[in-house]
């Protein structure tokens, strides 16, 4: 596996971002947009997939990263369940449901595979390239 320096490089994060954008597209359309409870919940769940991947990656420890990948999987499962509710209420066409469900399923499978990889490489490290920090001590507080 190539060295990943930023969470935006992770395929699993890119998939989660696509899922979030797709969820937002659907939830901006009537009548889905007026079902405030379901709309807000599915949006939060999709954002949670992205956020947990990011938070875990930025933690810089493998065990925390794995834990957050597991949370991301849980949120992707939540999105899948909520898609059934949206479909049952007639908010999504069969094609919209299938395409978005498949993306949510992928957003669940990818973290699982990454967890398996990380657990098979106990000495793998998530790391950042060397960065120089500059502090200007001459500025007023």
Image: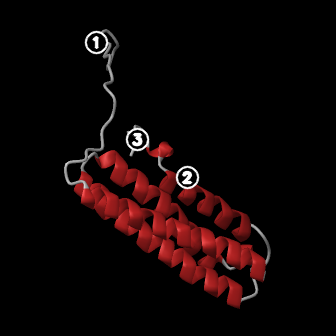
Along the line of sight, the residue nearer the viewer: 38 or 94: 94
Vertical side of 59 occupied by 52: above or below: below
Q: Secondary structure at mark 2?
A: helix
Q: Earlier in the sequence, mark 3 or mark 2?
A: 3
Which label was assigned to residue 62?
A: none
Q: Which residue is mark 1?
A: 137
Where is residue 127? Give x, y as percent: 30, 38
> Which numbered tag is attached to residue 2?
3
At 40% from the left edge and 41% from the top edge, which residue is drawn? 2
- Residues under labels 3 and 2: Cα distance? 16 Å
- Residue 34 visible from this viewpoint: no
> Could you tell whether 52 is left or right of 35 in the image?
left
- What is the x, y in percent for residue 141? 32, 20
Give the mark nearer the N terminus: 3 vs 1: 3
Residue holding disc 2? 14
**Does 21 sit above or below residue 2?**
below
- Where is residue 20 shown, x and y percent of the image? 60, 61
Dots 3, 2 in contact, CB < 8 A: no
Q: Nearer the viewer, residue 31 or 122?
A: 122
């Amino acid at each position: 596996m190539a060295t990943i320096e930023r969470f935006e490089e992770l395929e699993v994060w890119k998939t989660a971002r696509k899922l979030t954008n797709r969820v937002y597209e659907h939830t901006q359309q009537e009548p889905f947009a007026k079902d405030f409870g379901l709309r807000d919940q599915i949006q939060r769940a999709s954002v949670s997939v992205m956020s947990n991947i990011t938070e875990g990656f930025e933690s810089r420890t493998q065990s925390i990263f794995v834990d957050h990948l597991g949370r991301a999987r849980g949120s992707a499962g939540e999105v899948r369940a909520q898609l059934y509710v949206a479909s049952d209420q007639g908010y999504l066409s069969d094609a919209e449901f299938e395409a978005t469900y498949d993306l949510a399923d992928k957003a669940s499978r990818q973290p699982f595979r990454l967890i398996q990889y990380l657990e098979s490489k106990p000495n793998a490290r998530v790391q950042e390239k060397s960065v120089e920090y500059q502090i200007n001590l001459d500025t007023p507080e």
